[in-house]
Amino acid sequence: QVQLVESGGGLVQPGGSLRLSCAASGFTFSFYSMSWYRQAPGKERELVARISSTGDYTNYADSVKGRFTISRDNAKYTAYLQMNSLNAEDTAVYYCNVIVRREDYWGQGTQVTVSS
């Protein structure tokens, strides 16, 4: 079955960086686009970034453009989210997502807290 496991979250100071990883299994990773979403307390889940199956195309939420970079390693079945210049507004649970045969799959999420 499809499984997504996020890691790499934690507590970071404003201006700091983190790299999130999403380890995938149960489907042919190189066939599907991958996405990162986040959900802050009291807010709806929002799309942060998406990458095409080959990695050739990416898109980002306006709020993270120029600071976050999504990437993938198809040989390792892993997607990444490099987050730089973090600020308090980036505090959220970050989720990895894939749509396989029209069904949405989510990881368990990883907490990112930006605070001094």
Image (cartoon, rainbow, N blue to C red):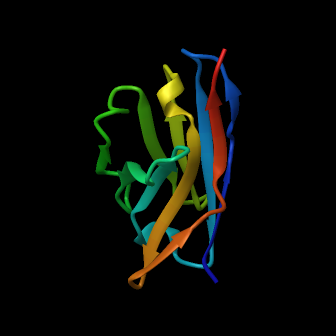
Q: Please name the residue shown 44% across and 43% down the image.
A: 70
Nearest the viewer among 116 and 83 is: 116
Q: Please name the residue shown 32% across and 32% down the image.
A: 65
**x then y, percent, for residue 19:** 60, 36
Q: Is residue 67 above or below residue 53?
A: above
> Residue 64 lies in what quarter of the image?
top left
Nearest the viewer among 97 and 92 is: 92
Q: Please name the residue shown 64% across and 21% down the image.
A: 115
Q: Is residue 74 above or below residue 100?
A: above
**x then y, percent, for residue 43:** 46, 48
Nearest the viewer among 15 and 24 is: 15
**x then y, percent, for residue 85:** 49, 19
> Residue 78 lies in what quarter of the image?
bottom right
On the rendered structure, is 57 left or right of 97?
left
Q: Quadrant of the N terminus?
A: bottom right
Picture mark count: 0
> Residue 45 lies in what quarter of the image?
bottom left
Q: Please name the residue shown 64% across and 32% down the image.
A: 113
Q: Quadrant of the C terminus?
A: top right
**x then y, percent, for residue 14:** 57, 16
